[in-house]
Every structure is written in structure tokens, then in C-alpha cells.
């Protein structure tokens, strides 16, 4: 998606320098073409199975990104009331909406009863109990999936592992078996799916093998059930290091797809990062190159408020100067303007010295980038652009200070 051409960095066919020249920095830019490529890989991998892709909106909730995905036939996976409203605003219909969350409110569950999403994932017996009371009260029925926690180590950062028994998500298999039995002939609730999502940024296949095999054995051990589908979650990792550590799709086809075929059920996929992660770039201006007797710093105008992954879980991102003028390669700390030592995108990174006033591209920031941005230090959230059919479209303006403080009325106090 990105490459140098005559020492200038290009995204698809557009020069980043050209894109940046009249825009306030930092900003995000996404490639629609790259999103398509990613979806093509998923489609190819699951070919022959009856599957439905839903996009985990938490990875990137720009409505135009969601709309673009909808137009590609992808559904949406939501975890909050806000994401639900966003899905409706963009025009997803109920058959394209999968609902997650471990803290669904009474009001939200009521709404789901009327809405009837494609999948409603239930996190706990307590939640199912609450839903059941509402069903009885309103005399409405619904099909649900149980989120199970297969207790496998996804071999990823502890903050993004979700399928260990100590994690807060889902229910252990024993509990799930009891729940399935208890609700077997419930007048309103039909448990017709199982859901599992074991973690994010997975680069190894074995956790999927273990988890899906466990669930397969689990289903085989049930005396009776009404299961028709498995929601296999997401979690496919991307190659932030660009060292051949991309998600091993071929190995997945070889080792995981046969397990999924054995289920002989419909599948729902909940992909976030894999669809949008490598399709986004954060472009930032180099304000200073600061040299101390101990270190050299690239001081950029982007910060942990725009992209928190490096500060939050040591997320690695490639950083390239947008203009490569051939100056020497040095170890740099790439830092931002926020008053926190943790406001750092890279430490001792060997890279070509960028030009002050020019730009750097922080790569693979399409997922959990803007979506996790904040106003810390009164930072205005950056603009977002989409490269579509070779042209550039602004899909969200840079946040506006006046709008941000519009709640402030001098007469209130
Ligand atoms: C976050 C999340 C996903 C998507 O995870 P990725 O690692 O971005 O693919 C899918 N399902 C659930 C339940 C999630 O919480």
C-alpha cells in the first residue's frame, strides 16, 4: 500500500507530501483499496464455508468507513449503544448487526428484543436471566448466542487477551452447558449460537486450533441443543514489524478451516484489525529534531492523544519520513507534545533523519488509532481522509475548538 518513489512516500498512487501540503497535521488517511484486499483474503480463506463477516466497529468507527464496508457486503459488530446508533445511521439492517458487550443495560436489551439483530451474544448467565425476565414481561422471543470462554492463551499482549479463565468475558464451558440445558425449552429464548473471541493481534494459529477444537468437543458432549451457528470472533493480527510476521493465512487454511468444517454450522466472523489496521496511516509534522548528549528525538505534532497504542501496550508501528533525503540513519526516539514521558511512538528506532517541517508517516494505524483518540492536553482530534478510486475524500474534519467547548456558558456558575 505504501512505497517510496523518487524518495517520496506514496499511499496507493498518491504522494503523501502532496496530500499533506495544505492540511493541518496530524491527520489519518485510509485506503479503500487496501480494505478490499484484506476482505478478499478473508473471503478466500473461508471459501466453501457458509460464513458472514462482521466488522468490529470498535477498531474504527468513522461512519464513512462503516458505510464503505457495508457497501462491500460486510456486516457490523457493535458493543455499545453508540455503535448501535452508528450502525443504524449508516443504514445497516438488523440482519447485518451482531451485538456484543458484557454490560448491556436493561433498556438496551429491550431495544434488542424489538430490533432482532443477526446475533446477540450473551456474556453471562446473569445477563441471560435479565433478558429472560424482559422476554416474559414483553412476551417477545429472541435467538441468542452464548459467549464462551474456552480458557486458551492467545499468545498476545495481556491487555488484549480475552479468552483466559481469569478474563472478564464470557462463561466457562461447564457453565455454558448448564445454561444450554436450563434454557432448552424456554418459551422465549432460543440459544442457537456459541460465540468466542479469544483475543486481539493473534499471530499464531495454535490458540485458534485449541479454542475451536475445545468448542467442537463441547458441542459433541451436549445431550441436546439448538445450535445452528458459531461466532468465531476476530483477532487476526497484522504485521506491524513487516518482518513476515503477518497473520499466517495459509497455515490457518490448513489447520483451522478443517476444524471449522467439522462443525457443519454457519459461521460469523468478527474482524476488526485485519480489515482496517494496515489500511490506515497517521501523518504528522516534524516540529523539531532535538539532540541531547544522550539521545536524539524526533518531536512530532502527533501524540498519544491521537494514537495511544504505543503508550498503552507497547504497540509497534513503522515510521517513515515522507521525504527521504538520504541523510544518515540514526537511533531516534519519536515523541509527541503531550506532558507524559509515555507520549512516545518509538524508542531508539533506527531511521533516516527526517527534515524539520516535513512529515512522518506512522503506519498500520487504521485500527484502534483514531478510535482510541482523546482530547488529553486539549488536543483536537485529527481529520480523517479516505483514498477512494485514486482520489482523496475528507471523511471527518479536524475537531473544532469552539465545538469542543460549546458546553461552556459563562452564566452557569
Ligand atoms: C475487539 C473484538 C473483535 C475484533 O477484534 P480484532 O482483534 O480487531 O479482530 C471481535 N469480537 C469481539 C467480541 C471483540 O471484542
Image: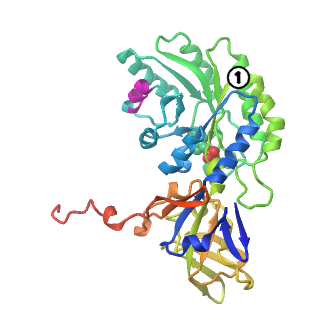
Residue 341 on the magenta span: no
Q: Taking the image as drawn, is residue 161 in sight?
A: no
User: Magenta residues: mostly which secondary structure?
Assistant: helix
Q: The N terminus lies in which quarter of the figure?
A: bottom right
Which corner quadrant of the image does residue 334 belong to?
bottom right
Q: Is the residue 366 above or below the residue 410 in the image? A: above
Residue 228 placement, left or right of 246: left
Which corner quadrant of the image does residue 194 belong to?
top right
Q: Taking the image as drawn, is residue 86 in sight?
A: yes
Residue 91 placement, left or right of 38: left
The residue that appears at 82% across and 43% down in the rendered structure is 250
Q: Is the residue 234 above or below the residue 276 in the image? A: above
Q: The C terminus lies in which quarter of the figure?
A: bottom left
Residue 399 placement, left or right of 302: left
Which secondary structure lies at badge 1? helix
Q: Nearer the viewer, residue 239 or 171?
A: 239
Q: Nearer the viewer, residue 193 or 341?
A: 193
In the picture of the structure, the residue carrying the numbered disc 1 is: 218
Return the x and y of residue 19 as percentages of the image width and height.
56, 70
Residue 112 on the magenta span: yes
The residue that appears at 42% across and 63% down in the rendered structure is 375
State the residue lying farthest toward the left.
411
Q: Is the residue 334 above or below the residue 117 in the image? A: below
Q: Quadrant of ligand 1?
A: top right
Q: Is the residue 224 above or below the residue 52 in the image? A: above
Return the x and y of residue 97 as percentages of the image width and height.
52, 33
Mark 1, ligand 1, within 8 Å: the answer is no
- Within 10 Å of disc 1 (Cα), the crowding (few <14, some 14-19, many 20+) is some
The residue that appears at 58% across and 33% down in the rendered structure is 170
Return the x and y of residue 77 as percentages of the image width and height.
54, 38
Return the x and y of residue 85 as percentages of the image width and height.
41, 40
Q: Which residues are magenta?
A: 108-115
Amino acid at each position: 500500500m505504501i512505497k517510496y518513489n523518487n524518495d517520496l512516500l506514496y499511499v496507493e498512487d498518491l504522494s503523501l507530501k502532496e496530500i499533506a501540503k495544505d492540511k493541518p497535521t496530524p491527520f489519518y488517511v485510509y485506503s479503500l483499496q487496501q480494505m478490499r484486499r484484506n476482505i478478499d483474503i478473508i473471503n478466500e480463506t473461508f471459501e466453501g464455508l457458509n460464513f458472514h463477516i462482521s466488522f468490529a466497529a470498535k477498531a474504527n468507527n468513522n461512519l464513512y468507513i462503516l458505510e464503505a464496508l457495508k457497501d462491500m457486503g460486510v456486516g457490523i459488530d457493535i458493543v455499545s449503544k453508540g455503535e448501535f446508533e452508528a450502525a443504524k445511521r449508516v443504514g445497516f439492517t438488523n440482519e447485518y448487526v451482531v451485538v456484543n458487550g458484557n454490560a448491556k443495560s436493561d433498556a438496551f436489551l429491550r431495544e434488542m428484543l424489538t430490533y432482532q439483530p443477526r446475533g446477540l451474544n450473551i456474556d453471562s448467565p446473569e445477563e441471560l436471566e435479565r433478558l429472560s425476565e424482559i422476554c416474559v414481561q414483553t412476551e417477545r422471543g429472541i435467538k441468542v448466542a452464548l459467549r464462551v470462554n474456552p480458557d486458551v492463551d492467545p499468545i498476545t499482549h495481556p491487555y488484549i487477551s480475552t479468552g483466559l479463565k481469569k478474563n472478564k468475558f464470557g462463561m466457562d464451558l461447564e457453565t455454558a452447558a448448564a445454561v444450554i440445558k436450563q434454557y432448552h425449552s424456554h418459551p422465549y429464548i432460543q440459544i442457537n449460537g456459541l460465540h468466542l473471541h479469544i483475543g486481539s493481534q493473534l499471530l499464531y494459529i495454535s490458540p485458534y486450533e485449541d479454542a475451536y477444537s475445545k468448542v467442537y468437543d463441547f458441542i459433541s458432549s451436549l445431550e441436546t441443543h439448538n445450535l445452528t451457528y458459531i461466532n468465531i470472533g476476530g483477532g487476526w493480527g497484522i504485521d506491524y514489524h513487516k518482518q513476515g510476521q503477518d497473520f499466517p493465512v495459509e497455515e490457518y487454511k490448513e489447520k483451522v478451516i478443517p476444524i471449522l468444517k467439522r462443525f457443519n454450522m454457519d459461521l460469523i466472523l468478527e474482524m476488526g484489525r485485519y480489515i482496517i489496521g494496515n489500511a490506515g496511516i497517521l501523518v504528522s509534522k516534524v516540529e523539531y529534531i532535538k539532540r541531547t548528549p544522550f539521545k536524539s528525538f524526533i518531536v512530532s505534532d502527533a501524540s498519544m492523544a491521537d494514537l495511544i497504542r504505543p503508550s498503552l501496550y507497547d504497540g509497534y508501528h513503522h515510521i517513515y519520513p515522507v521525504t527521504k533525503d538520504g541523510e544518515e540513519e540514526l537511533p531516534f526516539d519519536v515523541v509527541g507534545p503531550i506532558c507524559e514521558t509515555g507520549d512516545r511512538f518509538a524508542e531508539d528506532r533506527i531511521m533516516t533523519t527526517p527534515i524539520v517541517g516535513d512529515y512522518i508517516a506512522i503506519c498500520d494505524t487504521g485500527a484502534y488509532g483514531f478510535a482510541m483518540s482523546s482530547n488529553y492536553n486539549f488536543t483536537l482530534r485529527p481529520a480523517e481522509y479516505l483514498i477512494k478510486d485514486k482520489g482523496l475524500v475528507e471523511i471527518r474534519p479536524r475537531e473544532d475548538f469552539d465545538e469542543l467547548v460549546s458546553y461552556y456558558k459563562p452564566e452557569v456558575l
